[in-house]
């Protein structure tokens, strides 16, 4: 494909790295110079252009802009009616993005995570599932959503990633003060959480780790009694 990227920041750059070896011709916008230059230096099939140059060179375009500036940036560009957009803008619905790129079409909205650069990451998306699968589905797990309400709910729930990372980091810090190899300790905890949650439904894993008096049960009960669950629900409700 001829793929363009307008707004090549951290996430959009990771998305490009994840597909750069798939034979696409990719053009990235010059405004995020550090990311654009790094991509162009790493891959022969990645070039840099101004925003209109990205549009002119592409059939599918990733929109990695901040939603509050997107209307002004995109409104200054001339799109074609045969172009399809995949928007990464969490603060703009698929319908809102579509209105910004007329006569092109906003075909899908998706929310990549940094891990998309290496693959194996979940991608929540709404819209043209076939297009997203064709570009990203070979290495990642695609989770199609039916409408903007589902996307909004998923966006809130995915925020659990940061608190989970915080808990693993804090446990790793605690462990690091008690063992000889702090880095190995953190690597163990990351692998422990990732592998067990990837292979088991969370409720089943909780039950499997519910041995009376066992370390896992005792720590979980302590956290629950400290208000962990209620704090999580309140936080999600506030995001919603």
Image: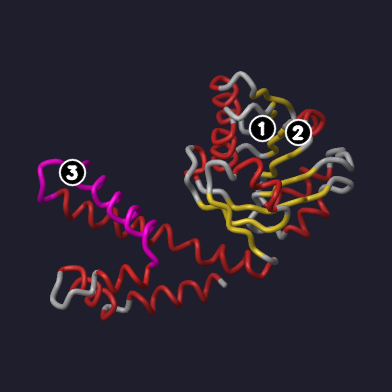
Tell me the residue at 33%/53% (across/down). Answer: 195
Q: Which residue is mark 1?
A: 31
Label 3 or label 2, whichever comes before in sequence order: 2
Work out whether residue 66 or residue 53 is closer to the camera in this orientation and state it.
Answer: 53
Left or right: residue 8 versus residue 119 is: right
Using the image, tell me which numbered label, if any, was put on residue 117. none
Residue 238 screen position, x and y as percent: 52, 74
Tell me the residue at 54%/66% (across/down). Answer: 156
Inter-mark Cα distance, 3 to 2: 45 Å
Looking at the rendered image, the disc whose residue lies closer to the viewer, 1 or 3, is 3
Q: Is residue 12 magenta?
A: no
Looking at the rendered image, the disc whose residue lies closer to the viewer, 2 or 1, is 2
Element carrying mark 2: helix
Q: Which residue is mark 3?
A: 182
Tell me whether the residue at label 2 lies in contact with that at label 1, contact meaning CB atoms closer than 8 angstroms.
yes
Q: Give the magenta-colored segment's residue range.
A: 177-201
Inter-mark Cα distance, 2 to 1: 8 Å
Q: Main secondary structure of the magenta part?
A: helix
Q: Which residue is mark 2?
A: 51
Q: Residues within 10 Å of mark 1 (few under 14, many from 20)?
A: some
Element carrying mark 1: loop
Give the answer, above or below, for where 154 lies relative to 17: below
């Amino acid at each position: 494909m001829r793929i363009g990227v307008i707004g090549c920041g951290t996430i959009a750059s990771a998305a490009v790295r994840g597909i750069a070896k798939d034979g696409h011709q990719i053009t990235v916008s010059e405004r995020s110079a550090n990311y654009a230059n790094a991509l162009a230096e790493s891959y022969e099939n990645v070039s840099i252009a101004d925003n209109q140059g990205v549009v002119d060179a592409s059939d599918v375009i990733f929109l990695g802009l901040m939603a509050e500036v997107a209307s002004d940036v995109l409104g200054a560009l001339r799109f074609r009616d045969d172009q399809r957009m995949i928007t990464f803008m969490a603060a703009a619905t698929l319908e809102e993005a579509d209105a910004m790129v007329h006569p092109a079409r906003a075909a899908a909205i998706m929310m990549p995570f940094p891990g998309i650069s290496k693959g194996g990451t979940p991608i929540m998306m709404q819209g043209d599932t076939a297009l997203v699968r064709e570009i990203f589905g070979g290495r990642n797990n695609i989770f199609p959503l039916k409408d903007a309400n589902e996307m909004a709910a998923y966006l809130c729930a995915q925020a659990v990633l940061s608190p989970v990372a915080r808990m693993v980091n804090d446990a790793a810090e605690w462990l690091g003060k008690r063992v000889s190899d702090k880095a190995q300790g953190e690597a163990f905890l990351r692998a422990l959480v990732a592998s067990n949650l990837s292979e088991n439904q969370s409720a089943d894993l909780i039950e499997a780790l519910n041995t009376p008096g066992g370390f896992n049960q005792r720590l979980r009960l302590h956290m629950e009694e400290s208000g962990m669950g209620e704090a999580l629900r309140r936080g999600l409700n506030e995001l919603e």
